[in-house]
Image (spheres, rainbow, N blue to C red):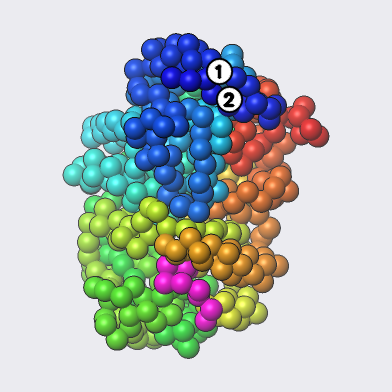
Amino acid sequence: MTTIQPTTLAGHKTTLRAETIADLRNRLHGVLLQPGDPGYDEARQLFNAMIDKRPALMARCTSAADVITCVNFAREQGITVSILGGGHNGAGLALVDDGLVIDLSEMRTIIVDPEVGTVRVGPGARWSEVDQATHPYGLAVPSGIIANTGVAGLTLGGGLGHLSRQYGLTIDSLLEAEVVLADGRLVKASESENADLFWALRGGGGNFGVVTSFLFQGRPVHTIVGGPMLWPLEDAAEVMRWYRDFIVTAPENVNGFFAFLTVPPGPPFDESLHLKRMSGIVWAINDSPERAAQILDAVREKFPPAQDLVGPLPFPALQSMFDAVHHPGLQWYWRGDFVNELSDEAIERHLEFAHQLPTMHSTMHLYPINGAVHRVGPSETAFNYRDSTWAQVIVGVDPDPAKAGLLRDWTVAYWEALHPYSAGGSYVNFLMEEGQERVQATYRENYPRLAAIKAIYDPHNFFHVNQNIKPARLRSA
């Protein structure tokens, strides 16, 4: 074992002696990895393969006690930390070069209480694991659209997906969280305990501490009617104009996100459509097949789809439907915006870039966030854009690292063309490293309150490898 030179909170190099590292290793129940150790390179692989970071140390925590040990060690040694849950963050902020990674991926316990419908989840769990645990009880926790996404990151950013219109964001089902603070204390945050911290956690990302346990209220979901309908791009403008009006008045148990995509070359897609650029709506209707048909048959009659894969299926099947296409290890570049209205002019700009989808995996999604999301006020949680209709994401994706520049250029050009039609900010989980102005635009009038709460719970900005909210007194730093 040799000495290492991690990065300090001030951005300088420091030296950790071998015996100091050994002492940390001995105090952890989990495994401590450093460069050269077996398993180190596997542990630092992220969902976005465009990110390649080399931490000085990775602590694979197995309990809140391990997290406390890591936080205290990093604070006492003055070294930078990051927090790794599922590793899905597009900007790669789960890892930090030359710092200590607090790796929560081993903390995956899930406990369902069917009597009251609650679900306690460890911060390293994936949504696929939550779905498997809750589905036998006819429950689900509102989450995203990719089942291998980590619970922690999606929740702390807000959490939007197939169930948003009916049950709200993921944070709207969060009852409490246990959090390790920058000073090493373990506290509970809920409506009745550390309520200011609980407010900030619901959308404020990993700025306020390390969440070691989430308690959610499960929602009644079992068999839904869902899946994609696809149309040729020449029909997309008409479908989009219909969709923009339909989704704001549809029953709240009807969800459908609009997408531009390239059809994957395999089942269940018709061979005649393989690798064609198309438009689509991915439906999720939490109702009987008979009542769902009343809505969907009207759509089919008005806009006969080129392929219709919508039908009854278990909710976990819909959640995992796109995991095979958007699997870990691809190159990703993201840009996002909130959108209030979808004008004819905006639709025209969308279609320009839909015809230029650069790779098979690249896409654009418009996720509806009206319905139940709007029943919570913009200042009731840190997630501010409660008045928007959609969260838009544009992603350039491909397995080939040589195409990284192409992916970025297409994504940024598309975003720049549509940003003038947006509400201004972005869903925080769709941000790359875009600077403080974009972070502040994401929280709007909630940002000063977040900065004030940050000053209480993390006054020295110990947790800053994130979409950073600076403590109030450090905002000019």
What is the residue that sits farthest to the left in this orientation? 136
> Which residue is label 2 attached to?
5
The residue pinned by badge 1 equals 16
> For this view, does 24 lie left or right of residue 217?
right
Q: Tell whether 112 sits left or right of 50.
A: left
Q: Residue furthest front?
A: 2
Give the quadrant of residue 453: top right
Q: Position of residue 104 (x, y in %)?
A: 40, 31
User: What is the x, y in percent for residue 67?
Assistant: 44, 21
Magenta span of residues: 355-363
Assign the N terminus to one quadrant of the image. Answer: top left
Q: For the residue labelled by badge 1, is the local secondary structure a helix, a strand or a loop?
A: loop
| Mark 2 or 1, nearer chain start | 2
Q: Residue at x 29, y 36 (%)?
A: 117
Q: Residue furthest bottom?
A: 234
The local crowd at label 1, few if under 14, some if 14 to 19, many if 20 or more residues have their Cα within 10 Å, is some
Contact, mark 2 vs mark 1 (Cβ under 8 Å):
yes
Residue 99 lies left or right of residue 305; in this view the side is: right
| Place of residue 3 in the rendered image (x, y in percent of width and height, measured from the top left) | 52, 20
